[in-house]
Image (spheres, rainbow, N blue to C red):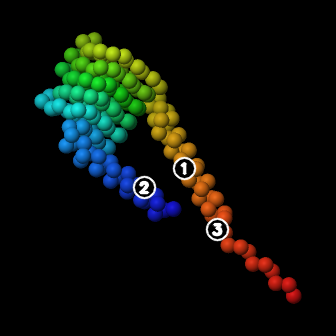
Amino acid sequence: MFSSVRCLILFSLVSALGSSAVAEGSHERTEVGHDITIGADQTASEATCFGCSVRVRGRVDGDITTFGGSIVIERDGFVGGDATVFGGDLRLDADAKVKDVTVFGGRVHRDPQAVVDGDTTTFAGGAALWLFILFGLPFLFLGAIIGLVVWLIRRFKRPALPVAARV
């Protein structure tokens, strides 16, 4: 069991690091634990961040999504798609422009001169509660299933007790 946990952690790490390298070549920015900054003279097609934040000074043609981090769209920053935040805040500075805004477990800080072309949806509440519901509950369920399988395997693999010899 311990070696399978190590393999799972190693696979997750390699996947996360590998996706970052592949995403750079296609102008998609994907990071785990490292903030993403799109400079004033830079363009990205999409940005996704796990456990980190995204700061946009330039242009993102598609969507921005953060899990456990925030999004900041600075003055004259442009997002052609949706800005979605799970467990963090979204800040729109003056003259920032975005299509739709969705925030789960955080707040929207919007300058009056910022432009949102579509909808602004906020599910306020404790960030920890939303993160637990979105990510913790499925892992808890998966852990319970794995525990049940391990228990069943151990139960059926128990050695038979020797029969006492009669004298």
Residue 96 horizontal/vertical position (percent): 23, 19
The residue pinned by badge 1 equals 143
Residue 99 horizontal/vertical position (percent): 29, 20
Residue 24 horizontal/vertical position (percent): 21, 42
The quadrant the C terminus occupies is: bottom right
The residue shown at (19%, 43%) is: 25
The residue pinned by badge 2 equals 8
Q: Earlier in the sequence, mark 3 or mark 1?
A: 1
User: Is residue 16 in view?
Assistant: yes
Mark 3 or 1, which is nearer the eye? 3
Cα distance in 3D space between marks 3 and 2: 25 Å
Q: Earlier in the sequence, mark 1 or mark 2?
A: 2
Give the answer, above or below, for where 120 lies relative to 150: above
The amino acid beneath tag 3 is Lys
Crowd class of label 2 (few under 14; some 14 to 19; many from 20; radius 10 Å) = few
Cα distance in 3D space between marks 1 and 2: 13 Å
Question: In the shown orientation, is residue 78 left or right of residue 137?
Answer: left
The residue pinned by badge 3 equals 157
Q: Residue furthest bottom?
A: 167
Q: Residue furthest left?
A: 41
Element type where label 2 sits in the image: helix
Cα distance in 3D space between marks 3 and 1: 21 Å
The residue shown at (33%, 20%) is: 100
Mark 3 or 2, which is nearer the eye? 3
The residue shown at (29%, 42%) is: 31
